[in-house]
Image: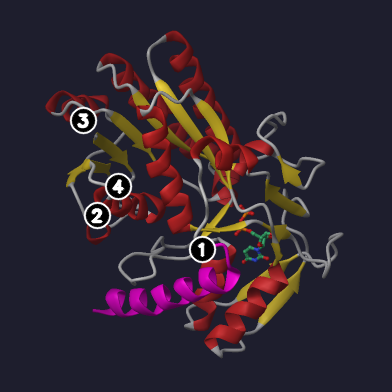
Amino acid sequence: MKVLVTGGAGYIGSHVVRQLAEAGHDIVVFDNLSTGYRWAVTAGELVIGDLANEAEIDQVFSSHRFDAVLHFAANIVVPESVTNPLKYYGNNTRNTLNLLKAVDKYKVPYMVFSSTAAVYGMPEQTVLTEDLPLAPINPYGASKMMSERMVTDLAAASGLNYVVLRYFNVAGANPDGLLGQATPEATHLIKVACECVTGQRGMSIFGTDYDTSDGTCVRDYIHVEDLASAHVMALDYMANGGESKVMNCGYGRGFTVSEVIDVVRRQSGVDFPVTKVGRRAGDPAALMADNALIKKTLGWQPAYDDLETIVGTALAWEAIWQKKKAA
Ligand code: UDP
């Protein structure tokens, strides 16, 4: 297929691009390089453009005939979305609208949209099914919920088929050391802990009084290569006539914050200090994906469902990235 990958120079998009190329797809990456990198685009053509600019979007759609659009481009930092909500409603929601206008105009048949478990907000359950009510508690989650809705509404009114994937906690890196998370000012736990190992920063545990095994929050950490393979499988699924679906993407099991930090310390051999502070607003005690639907629908089977592997690849990448940055 000829595929457009927005945000293909970013962390998750770049891993997907590599797998799409391996599967034989013909790729155009559209990215403004605000948090992505040219080196991360290991296949296809890179078009530097901004989804805020409808003329730039039209230009890329009129120069190619896309069979599918995979839409990764977005801002993803929850605390920033609280202090600067309009950035999120602009870059995530409005820019998805801009993209959908072109998807509709050029009658692109398939779309894969990157959503998030943040659309569920603070659910009562700890294992989440896709049919739960959507109740995001921050602008990031709301911006993604609205984007999902636009995708599904357009599909209902047109020939568009979609797969929406709600990601849980994505971490780890390409095992060959080619790619990994290079996002500046990352806030996600495993990335932050890896930066502590190399002495770039310190860190805190947000809350030690949750109703969990050790008092710290439980999350469902999924390796980025397994998330990437779900996207490639989603394209095959739609091409084979599969109907549009919204699916969680996680392993269905979790680890506490303290467990994750212990693994990073043990594997790295660096006993970096951690400060215990109060709860971060909006953190539910435990969140895990019910992944029965994606396993059944796509036949998706994780290959890296192991915290040691997730942390090991993240640490290896962090060392490579520090050298790359210094060079
Ligand atoms: N967390 C933490 N310290 C950090 C970053 C994260 O204690 O520096 C905790 C956070 O409170 C949550 C878990 O780690 O319980 C995962 O947070 P992250 O921001 O990685 O992902 P989220 O689950 O919020 O999407």
The residue under the point 54% across, 35% down is 297
**Would residue 298 be visible to someone looking at this image?**
yes
The residue under the point 40% across, 73% down is 317
First to last magenta residue range: 305-327
Q: CA distance from mark 2 to mark 1?
A: 23 Å
The residue indicated by pointer 4 is 20
Labels 3 and 2 touching (C-beta < 8 A): no
Q: CA distance from mark 4 to mark 3?
A: 24 Å
Mark 3 or mark 2, earlier in chain: 2
Q: Quadrant of the C terminus?
A: bottom left
Q: CA distance from mark 4 to mark 2?
A: 12 Å
Q: Is residue 18 highlighted in magenta? A: no
Q: Nearer the viewer, mark 4 or mark 3?
A: 4
Query: How busy is the neighbourhood of tag 2: few (under 14 within 10 Å), some, or many (20 plus)?
Result: many
Element marked by disc 1: loop
The residue indicated by pointer 1 is 304
Q: Amino acid at mark 3?
A: Glu
Q: Nearer the viewer, mark 3 or mark 2?
A: 2
Quadrant housing residue 32: top left
Mark 2 or mark 1, earlier in chain: 2
135 to the left or right of 246:
right
Labels 4 and 2 touching (C-beta < 8 A): no
Question: Residue 291: horizontal and vertical position, in percent?
Answer: 63, 44
Mark 3 or mark 1, earlier in chain: 3
Element marked by disc 4: helix
186 to the left or right of 176:
right
**Furthest-top residue in view?**
157
Mark 1 or mark 4, earlier in chain: 4
